[in-house]
Every structure is written in C-alpha cells, then in structure tokens.
Image (cartoon, rainbow, N blue to C red):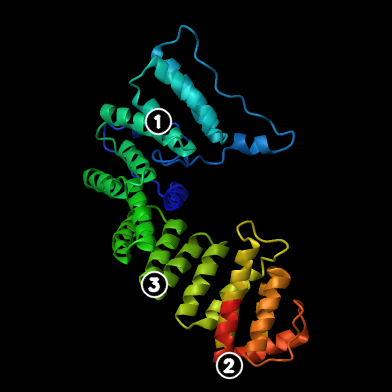
Amino acid sequence: MKLTYILGGLLFLAAAAVKSAPLAEGSDFGGARNLPINDPGAARLSPGVSDCYRASLQPGGKQCAEPALAAADASASDRVAAYLARAVFDIEMDKAQQALPEVDAALSVDADNVGARHLAARICLTIGDVDRAEREISIARRLAPNDPAIGTTYAAILIARQANREAVGVYDDIIRRHPNYLFARDQRAVLFTYLGECCARGNYSVALADLDYLIRHAAPNAELLARRAGVLAAVGKPADAVDDLTAAMRIGPDGELLKTSRAEYYARLGRDDLAVKDYDAVLAEASPGEPLYHFMPEQWTKLLVGRAFSLVRLNRLDDAANDVVKAIAVGGKPAILRAQVMLRRHGFPDVPINGQDSPKLRQALSACFGLMSCYQPVMHAI
C-alpha cells in the first residue's frame, strides 16, 4: 500500500508537466474546459495557484466572491454550468472536498452530464475516496467511451487499486487511439519510471521512449528534461543526463534541485571539479538554519557529504573534512560521537570521544580521507 501512495504522489506531481495537444473532434476533455489553467484535465486534480487563492492567504487580502447560483427559472444546462463553476472555484481555492457537493448538485439536475461525472471521479480520487471515484468513472466511460481524458483518469484509479498491469493496458489503448494526447503518455512515463525503480530496470525503456516523444512534441519543459535525466542516469548514461539537466537549467535557470542532480552525475563521470562547482552554487544559498524552501536539514547534509566525496577525489582533504564536520553537526552529539568512535577504531587514538567539534577531529578526518582503508568506513558511518 505504501508503494501505491508513492506512485500516486509521483503521478500527482507530474500531472501538470505536459500541455496536451487538442483532443479529437467531438471530445470536450470530459467537460473540464473550465478547470484551472494548470490542470491537465484528467487524473488527480492539479489546480494552479489562482489570484483569489493568493489573496486569501494575505492578512486583510481582498476575498473573491464565489460564482453565483443560476436563477430559479434558468435552464437545466445553465444550472449545471453554475454548479460546476462553483466547484471549480472551490478547487482553485484548494478546497476539493467542498467542491464535491456542488458537483453532486449538478448531477441532481443532469445525471448524464459527462463533465460532472468525470469531475466527481477526479475529486474523489484526489481526496482518497477511491470507491466512489471508481463508480463515477464507470458512468463517465459509459457516457463517453472514447474520451482520452476520462480514460486517463480511469487508469489513475486502477493504479490507486494497485492494478498497474491493467492501467498500462488502458494507457496503451489511449495512446494508440489518440497519439497526440500527450498527458496519457506523460502518465505512462511516470508509471514505468516507478516500475523501473521498484521492480525491473527493463521498464525504463518504455519510460525513456515516452519522455523522448514528449520532449519532441511538447513545449520546452524543464521538468520533462529533469525526469528524462533521472531515467538516463538510472540506465547508466550520466553524460546524457548532464546534458538534459543543463538544457533544463537554460529554460529555468534558478534550479537548485537541477544543479544538485547534475553535481551527482558529474561526480559519477569523474568530473569532480564540475561537481564541486555545482555543489558550491547550491550550498551558497542554503544553510541548516535557513534552508531553501525545498531543502530540509537532512538534504542539506546530503549536499555537504556529496561535495566532500568530490573534494576527497580532488585531494582537497581539509575542505572535505570541514564539510563532513558541518554535515555530522546537523545530527547533533550522537552523530559526532559515531564519527569519533570510527576514527579511534581506524588509527586515530588522539581524537576525543566527547561529541563535540574540535581541531583534532578535523585534523583526524583530513588525514583519514587520505587513507582508503579509513575513508570508506568513516564516510559509511556518517
């Protein structure tokens, strides 16, 4: 079950990475034309950050009024449209749970409205009510059996049910029927990347083929390039991964996470000078006291240890020792004690066992890093 949640999270995070080409004539994206602009129209909801939502977070900010209900004598189609507009407003305000009653009200007016059925399925999938999501998507598929967006939501529900093989079959069928519907290919790439990581490396070939296609046919997209870089590194092509990350940074230059991955791949290539340059750039913006919004203390520690590995290979042993001391300090006294004990065991009897930083600790680490028999076990302990 835990792996299913992880995969669901990956699919959610990738949900807005691709802007698909228009659907085949006659499809209305499952009735989702009025969803937030960054939402892909299928699978879990991925609302954009609206001006109204941003205003609601500011003290004294102007609050947006929700869309009005239709007049009592309005047509059924107008009443449905009004309810769905209110549901979309709730979604944009990050209140998916509150959107569901509005969709239910629309369905009470028109039980066969495919857009409302599809949106109900997506809301339920997002909030974790997979049973109702499955019921709603079954009706939506009956009403619009060839709609690729509805099919893609169905595949996401199958994944939530741990039915990955069946989901693959659904993605395959959508892509065969609608080759220009890029979002299904995007989600299949996410699934096969996950399957490559958890199950069998051979799955990476499908993910890589899909990502290649997406990068050729979608607008320039740093996230797609970064995802392909991860797959390329996993199949033993770190040089190609570096190229993708460099291209991604040209699209979005403020990419600390991209630089972090590129540093790792440079190190794999033996280009420790370039790895250190990237680590330097990222660490210059981060500290354990005030980490970047996406760097927690343990990630900051990982950056320091990564740079230390490259510094050792560059024979900058004192600098490596300084990084390691900073890294283990994040773990507090127990982490420093572990390092001190390991140094004592590997030929440095003068290192004090007190859980505190000291010149002797740094000197011992620097000397240790020059000895492979000491360096590897100490770094492993850290």
Kind of element beneath mark 2: loop
- The residue to which callout 3 is attached is 240
Instruction: Read off the residue under disc 1.
Output: 132
- The residue that mark 2 highlights is 371
Q: Secondary structure at mark 1?
A: helix
**Going 31% across and 31% down the picture, which residue do you hit?**
138
Decide if residue 210 is in sight here. yes
For the residue carrying disc 1, how many other residues have a C-alpha within 10 Å: few (<14), some (14-19), or many (20+)?
some
Labels 2 and 1: the sequence-earlier one:
1
- Residues packed near mark 3 inside 10 Å, few (<14), some (14 to 19) or many (20 plus): some
- The amino acid at mark 1 is Arg
Task: Calculate the distance from the C-alpha at mark 1 to the C-alpha at mark 3.
Answer: 44 Å
First in sequence, mark 2 or 3: give its number. 3
Q: Position of residue 130 (x, y in %)?
A: 41, 36
Task: Indicate the position of residue 374 as horizontal and vertical percent values.
Answer: 59, 89
Left or right side of 271 for 210: left
